[in-house]
Amino acid sequence: MKNKVLSVVLAVVIMAAFCGCSGYREPDSSYIVTALGFDADDEITVSAEVVTAGGSERSNEPYSEILTGRGDTPEDAVFSLNSQISKILMFDHCTAVIVGKTLSQDRFEDVIEYGLKLKELNFSVYMTVCDNAADLLNNSKSISVARGFDIASNIRETKKDTGIDYENRFFETFEAYKSKEYYSMPFLTLNDKRIIIKGEQIYKNKKEIATLSNEESLMYSFVKNNNRGGKIYLEQEYAQVTQSRFKMSESGIKATLYIKNNSKDFAFVFKQKTENFLSKYKDVLNFKSDKLELAVKDGV
């Protein structure tokens, strides 16, 4: 039932795109790009997930496919891809940019610069990372027809359910990259041919400095005061966290969790895991202390 609803939603998006402000476009003349992946060896490889309406040999539901191009720059790679097809590429509804870890610092900067030039690209597109973007897109199956939409849905649902905010947008990455601040991107992988979030990659001064698991990302979101609350599972312990406050100083971290429906030992496990996380990444992520003073109050 959920898949059918998602397909209907996507069909509406497609029809809206074909009837956009730039004038009506025939469905057979256009591709909607829903995800862009970038990898590198001696050249840049772009993998574009494109969606189109069903043709005469298919059902009326939209379907997706992966197109590939190669070139010296991201722009050249997309141009190469474009030269192989007769349809127009529409980037307005691209929801995810996937960066392969094969990209060097300079190559990643090229992707950022290309994104800025691509005026159709929505700057709210999610920035993500994986081992190899082409492998991820070509070896995965979509739930909602479009893998890009699946990635966006996964990021939003994770935030809603657990409070982990993986919502790193293009404009946020660009600003942090330009100012050499910390920034992160959700790390994607495959599980039974489904794209899932494995954790996040942390960057500083344009360099990769840490790879966090989902559990470490959870701890990191609390320490940064960036957790929105949700259903938290740690080992066999569970709690519904409604609010959290963390204040860091040289002498330690004072934290308050507002909880309802928690198991008896949740606070103990949470404190232990948070201190382990702080100790492991204290120098890498510039934490002032690895000691946690934890208070638990009733959630509203």
Image (cartoon, helix red, strand yellow):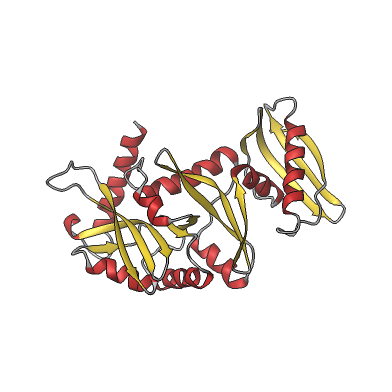
**Residue 258 appears in the rendering:** yes
The residue lying furthest to the right in this view is: 251
Q: Of residues 106 and 115, which is closer to you in this image?
A: 106
At horizontal 84% and vertical 50% (from top left) the residue drawn is: 252
Q: Quadrant of residue 239?
A: top right
State whether residue 275 is above or below residue 266: below
Quadrant where the C terminus is found in the figure: top right
Residue 105 drawn above or below residue 20: below
- Residue 262 rendering spot, x and y as whole percentages: 69, 28
Residue 176: image x %, image y %? 59, 66
Side of 254 relative to 35 (left or right): right
Q: Residue at x 53, y 70 (%)?
A: 105
Q: Residue at x 42, y 71 (%)?
A: 114
Q: Nearer the viewer, residue 225 or 134?
A: 134
Q: Which one is nearer the viewer's eye here, 230 or 79?
A: 79
Along the line of sight, the residue nearer the viewer: 11 or 264 = 264
